[in-house]
Image (cartoon, rainbow, N blue to C red):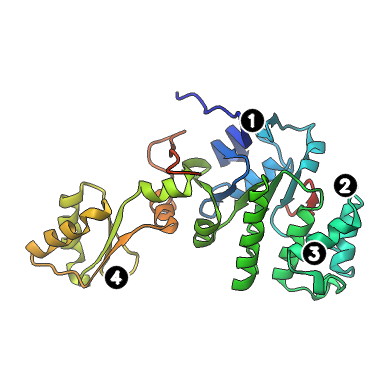
Amino acid sequence: MTAAPPTDGLALATRGLHKRYGSRVALAGLDLSVPSGVVYGFLGPNGAGKTTTMRLLTGLIHPDAGSIEVLGRPFGRRDRHRLFEVGAIIEAPAFYPYLSGRENLRALAATGAPTPRSRIEELLELVGLRDRAGDRVSGYSLGMKQRLGIAAALLSDPRLLLLDEPANGLDPAGIVAMRDTLRHLASRGKTVFISSHILAEIQQLADQAGIIASGRLVREGSIQALLASQGLVRVRVAAEEAGRAAAILEAFAGPGSVSASPGDDGWLTVRVDHGRAAAANRALAEAGIYASALESGNDLESIFLQLTGGEPSPGGEGTFTRMPDVDGPGPTAPGSGA
C-alpha cells in the first residue's frame, strides 16, 4: 500500500477517512490535501460523500476510522473549540427571520469570540448587503441569505473557510461578486474550501481541486494540472454512423478511449491529445465517414464526467491520482466555528 502523503504545510488534511451509515458506505478511505492560502474546489456527484465530509470537518459527526488535521493540528471529538479559527456554512445558513441582517450578525457574534461592531459593518459591505442590512431576513432572497451566511462565516476572521454550495441562489452578478470576494480572501492568506456542483465556476475560481466518487478521491491537484492531464477531442458524425465511427476511433486511439453522448446526436468523445485531432478526423475520412463538427479542448466538466460517470472509480479500493503542479500555483448556523 502506498504511504499517505505528508501533511506538513497543509491547511486541511484527511487520511484514510471512513464513514458508514448502517449498511451504506459514505466514505471509503478519503485522503485530501488542501494547501494553505488557496481556493480549493471539492467536487463529486450526488451521493459521493461531499456533505458527509463537510460534516466531519466541522465536528457535526465523527468518522468511523481515519484522521483529520485542521490548520496543522489533529482535529477530533474534543477539539470543537478550535473551530473559532474556522468559518463554515454547511447546507443552508440558519438565521432569525424576524431580525435584520445586521441584528443576526450581532447575535451570532455574541456567541463566539469578541467581535467589534466595525467588523460587522465591514462584512456587510464586503458581501454587498450594506444597503439591506436593516431589513428583516424574512424578506431576503435565497441569494441574499447566502451572502449573509458568508458574512457570518467570516465574523471571527477565520484562517479556514468551509463553504457548502456558496453560489446557491445567486444570480450571475452575485456569483461574480462572490468569486471576487473569495479570491480576495485567498490572496490574504486564508484557505477557502468549497463543495460545489457548479463545475464551470470552480474552474474559474479555484486554484486546486479534489474530485471524489463513491467515497474515494479519484483526482486531486491544481486546476491547471487537471486540465492539462486529459486530452479530449469531440467529433460529430451522422447518428447512423456513430457505432462504426466509434470502432474506427477506438482503433486509432486505443481500447476504451471513445464514449458516445447520452443522446442520439452523433457526438463522440475521444481521449486523445489535442494535437492528434486532425489525424482522428483523417482516420474517419479514410473509412468514408465525414465529421460535421470537430472540437478539441478540455474543461473541468468533461474531466469530472470522465472520472466519475456515476460509477466507482476504476482501479479499486484506495486508488487515486495526485497531479503535480504545472507552472505555479445537518444544517448548521454559520459564523464562528460550525
Q: Earlier in the sequence, mark 1 or mark 3?
A: 1
Q: Earlier in the sequence, mark 4 or mark 1?
A: 1
Q: Earlier in the sequence, mark 4 or mark 2?
A: 2
Q: Name the secondary structure under disc 3.
A: helix
Q: Position of residue 239 (x, y in %)?
A: 22, 71
Q: Earlier in the sequence, mark 1 or mark 2?
A: 1
Q: Position of residue 220 (x, y in %)?
A: 48, 42
Check if mark 1's residue and mark 2's residue have beta carbons within 8 Å.
Answer: no
Residue type, label 1: Ser
Residue at mark 4: 264
Find the distance from the CA under tag 2 to the CA under tag 3: 18 Å
Residue at mark 1: 67
Label for residue 112? Answer: 2
Q: Residues within 10 Å of mark 4 (few under 14, many from 20)?
A: few
Task: Decide if residue 67 is in sight here.
Answer: yes
Q: Earlier in the sequence, mark 2 or mark 3?
A: 2
**Vertical order, 190 against 178 (above or below):** above
Q: Name the secondary structure under disc 1.
A: strand
Q: Residues within 10 Å of mark 3 (few under 14, many from 20)?
A: many
Residue at mark 3: 124
Left or right, 77 with reference to 17: right
Find the distance from the CA under tag 4 to the CA under tag 1: 46 Å
